[in-house]
Amino acid sequence: MSGATRAAAAPRLYDRTSELAAGAALAARAAEGSGGVLLVTAGPGMGRTALLDRTVRECAIRAHRVGAPSGNRVPWSGVRALVSALAPTPSAARRAVRAARGPEGVAGALTALRPGEPLLLCVDDLHLWDAHSRTALDAVWRASPVPWAWVVSFAGHHRPPEVPGSRVLRLGRLGRQSAAALLDEVCRAPLTASVRARLLDEAAGHPGVLTAMAARLSAADGRSGAEGGPPGSVTDDAVLSEVYRGLLESLPAECERVLTLVAVAGEPDPAAAGPGDVRPVGADAVLAAARAVRASPEALDRLVAYGLLRGTREALRFEDALLRRAVLGTVPPSRRRELRALLAPPYGAGAAVGAGAAVAGAEDATDPLRAAEEARAPAGVVRGRAELVRGLAVLADGPAGDAHQVLLLAASLLREDAPEEAAEARFFAMEAARAAGDAEACATALGGGDDIRTRGTGRSDESTDAAERDFRDGMRAALAVRLHEARAPLARVVAHDGAAEEPRHLLRAGAAALVLGDAPTAVRVHARALAKVRAEGRTALLPRVLEHLAYAELRAGCHERAAAHAREGLRTAELTGQRNAAAHQHAVLALAASVSGDRHAVAEHAGRALGTARPHGLVQATTLAEWSLARAELADGLAAQAAARLAPLVGQGPRGGHFALRMLAVPCFVEAACAAGRAADARAAAEEFAVWAGLGVDPQAPAQLARCRALLAGADDSAHWYGEAVRHHEDTGNDFERARTLLAYGKWLRRRRRPVDARGPLSDALVTFERAAAGVWADQARAELRATGGAVGGTAATSPEAAGELTPQQQRIAGLVAAGATNREIADRLSLSPRTIDHHLRNVFARLGVRSRVELSGLLARTSGDTWDTRRAPDARRTGP
């Protein structure tokens, strides 16, 4: 462990029977030359380093017992810790890990330590390693050719690394009997019965606190309570701060400030409170005060995600009451008074602003301009900031229309004296209106000419003001379908904000790029926003950035990348309680699954998206989900059903789809309507789409329009329009849409009794669909090609090469099954239901010609080691899906 937490570790391990048994089992496997990964997680002072040390000693004892080689045993000649083996210090070890290029380089460096001998590698405090070093270690875990034994510890508020075949041990508090035995062991002087009982009560089984307080009380002969705690308290806040110091120092600065605000806000009135009383703390009050201490709203979200804070918005609380006291122990009394004045001002909102300026000045005395600005701010600014926080909360999990109205109110309150925050409120009000599919509300959120003001603080940024005006003017023109007026200002927004550092400006640039039809630029800008948000640890904003990035990748035709980012966004949205963002990510995953032809995944993700999108008025997510269902139906040959589902989405009016998605879904509707015999509806939609394509803002539109005309044209003209569609596709880069055109063209040629001419387009479409992992579309192309008498190719289903025909989702599931994961474990990891996993696995069995998990593991073991890894499979005995 790190820093002060080492001193708080217990000299002996109590209540750790199962954990010690797990360490002993790993030691036994290591001595036999086998491997495994043991992940130990706990809060500060809970003894995770002591457990690592005990495992090392157990390995040393077993190494001595193994002695000379016997049978298949490998001689054990010593225990090696990773840090001491690679370099003399942890930082040097991390540099050595990064210097070895790739997992093979790291594996080679470690193997060279003791060639042919078992190796135990201990990594303590993994959460303190930098991202590059953790990535290198992760690669070694996943791809190393030697089954080493690993013992890895990390802080309890960090998520465990995903290591195949690993076991996670979470160290909890001690029972009272064990806590009493530990206290008797570590206390050098006898304690009075009352002090001993009170200490056991207050320490609540925390071994680090018991050890540290025993040393403190031993020095005082245990005759009285310690100074510094609440009345009647034995435990000392200063000692608690020392025990928790490593945790507090590892937090980002703004998280530590918000944690301090919550701790101080929960302090009761000293004149009326009893010992241990804690007042309820509202999130809105904390967030309103957070800006004054240089902390963003995302800091509170990170603390909740870490598990350090719990509760509702009306009543936040510390998960660990001792941590709250440890935080208070680091705050001087004068500072507590300042924070209390900020959190609970006695003279109204104006006093809160003045207190905020005082606190900000205490934090940064070198910025008197900022302090003076805060002091002059009227009372409405405090309310505006509270409304901004409330609006963002509703935008994350609530009706989009409500979020729009609350954010507009925040913008009006902040407009005069906090223009940058007002611009932020307007932008997210527009985001809420966009999610709700309300173009008029989007225009309202953008505001008029007087809504963008030059900053009156002496620090105006004219280029930022110009970008605000350009975004407003360009988006208002685009919403009014005056795209000739929108191009120039939006192009300037992309150029200016695309190089910005603030994520909100990058999101704005990405939105402008999409309106201009430049999906690759939108992807690049949103990827930059993602990197910035990750680097700054802005957890609350991460799902929204991933939502924008995944959607831009869909528009660019990068369906697999969109699905990967949507899965990450879904996990983050669920972790931070942002159901609206989760609904959009489910919709993206459904649309991506409709490309791969995974019907059950389409149904599951679309259903989850609609379950939130409909009651919250998320028209964009609803449209994407319905579109994905229609695509899956069209791929299954259910053209009439697909056309009926798509008809409202491409129409106008209250039942219509999202204003920015209507035209994008028209080509799919035309194809379904033509196949269903609804030629008149298809022709009307195609004519409206022709107007849209003529605006020149969608690079895909000319090719898709030509395909629509080919479907609607007579026998003499269809060939011409198919040729035009293929020609336009060459300039767009969307391989999936090009393959769909080739498939339609090949079908048309075959039905005109021109099988030889049809083979070329169909073969090209088949290869493209297979490359894009679009399984159901590839099956259609393969069937059409076979009907022409052309060679389909392929290998026997039972050969190892057949695994390459699985979809990416099927490959992931097959790999996890081969590694020993259960259906429930796979479902949790991929955010799917066990029933869907079961369906996928049965399809895998059918496609590969196997009947059990054992046969599947054996087949995949014969394929490339870069793709499948069954060496760590802990249980290959299951025989059914």
Image: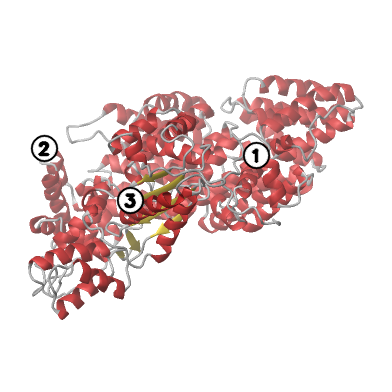
Name which quarter of the figure residue 350 lies in.
bottom left
Given residues 583 and 109, the one toward you in this image is 109
Image spot of residue 426 (x, y percent) = 37, 43
User: Amino acid type of disc 1?
Assistant: Ala
Give the Cα separation between the discs numbered 3 and 2.
Answer: 28 Å
**Residue marked by disc 3:** 388
Q: How is the image coloured?
A: secondary structure
The type of residue carrying mark 2 is Thr
Q: Which mark identifies residue 366?
A: 2
Residue at the extreme right of the image, as rendered: 753
Badge 1 or badge 3: first in the primary sequence:
3
Residue, disc 1: 665
Mark drawn on residue 363: none
Residue at 58 percent across and 44 percent down: it is: 871
| Residue 720: percent from left, percent from top | 79, 20
* Outermost bottom residue: 193
Type of the residue with mark 3: Leu
Camera-nearest residue between 74 and 712: 74
